Image (cartoon, helix red, strand yellow):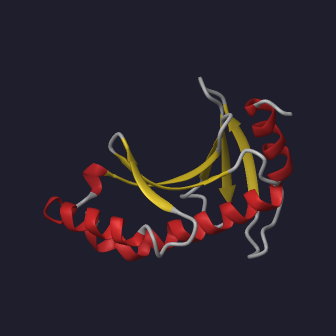
């Protein structure tokens, strides 16, 4: 059984240069930190990379949406209500907030295959773009 670090390195090597079923080209880079993070950059979607962490219980994939200071102050409560309402109908993704940063994320079992991770990245990338488009009016432009 691989350690979380070995799993992250395996995914980095396996995903780099891969093309998803939807034609998205993936590039990977491990960002060293206290807990290493795999950054997956998607061609034509470079502004919204997918960040992946692995621990003993899950593989977490997330993309940053916007910071709290980018929300129109008068729209914040309506945005939160909309995010909660979108959590169920948005396939395989959920919204959260880490510090002052809003994110969209999905999680997989630690024994997920590379193909399952590619599908998660594909869905999460599409859902990130959908969220930005659908919620753009709540943001300061």
Q: Is residue 64 left or right of residue 44?
A: left
Please state the total of marks drawn on the protein image: 0
Name the residue rendered at 73%, 69% in the picture.
24
Name the residue rendered at 30%, 70% in the picture.
82
Q: Is residue 47 left or right of residue 16?
A: left
Work out whether residue 38 or residue 113 is closer to the camera in this orientation and state it: 113
Residue farthest left in this picture: 74
Residue 16, can we see it?
Answer: no
Q: Quadrant of the N terminus?
A: top right
Name the residue rendered at 84%, 41% in the picture.
10
Where is residue 19 drawn, in percent x and y? 81, 66
Q: Quadrant of the C terminus?
A: bottom left
Residue 93, can we see it?
Answer: yes
Work out whether residue 32 or residue 109 is closer to the camera in this orientation and state it: 109
Where is residue 11 drawn, in percent x and y? 80, 46
Where is residue 43 drawn, in percent x and y? 69, 64
Question: Looking at the image, is 28 positioned above or below residue 136?
Answer: above
Q: Is residue 128 left or right of residue 140?
A: right
Where is residue 107 drawn, in percent x and y? 61, 53
Question: Looking at the image, is 92 positioned above or below residue 102?
Answer: below
Name the residue rendered at 81%, 61% in the picture.
115
Q: Is residue 42 left or right of residue 68?
A: right
The quarter holding residue 113 reads bottom right
Residue farthest top in this picture: 34
């Amino acid at each position: 059984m691989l350690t979380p670090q070995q799993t992250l390195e395996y995914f980095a090597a396996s995903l780099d240069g891969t093309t998803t079923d939807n034609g998205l080209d993936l590039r990977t880079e491990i960002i060293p930190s206290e807990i290493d993070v795999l950054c997956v950059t998607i061609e034509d979607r470079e502004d919204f990379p997918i960040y992946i962490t692995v621990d003993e219980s899950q593989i977490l994939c997330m993309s940053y949406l916007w910071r709290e200071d980018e929300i129109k102050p008068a729209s914040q409560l309506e945005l939160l209500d909309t995010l909660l309402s979108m959590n169920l109908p948005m396939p395989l993704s959920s919204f959260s907030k880490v510090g002052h940063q809003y994110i969209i994320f999905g999680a997989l079992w630690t024994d997920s295959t590379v193909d399952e991770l590619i599908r998660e990245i594909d869905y999460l990338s599409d859902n990130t773009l959908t969220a930005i488009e659908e919620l753009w009016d709540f943001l300061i432009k």
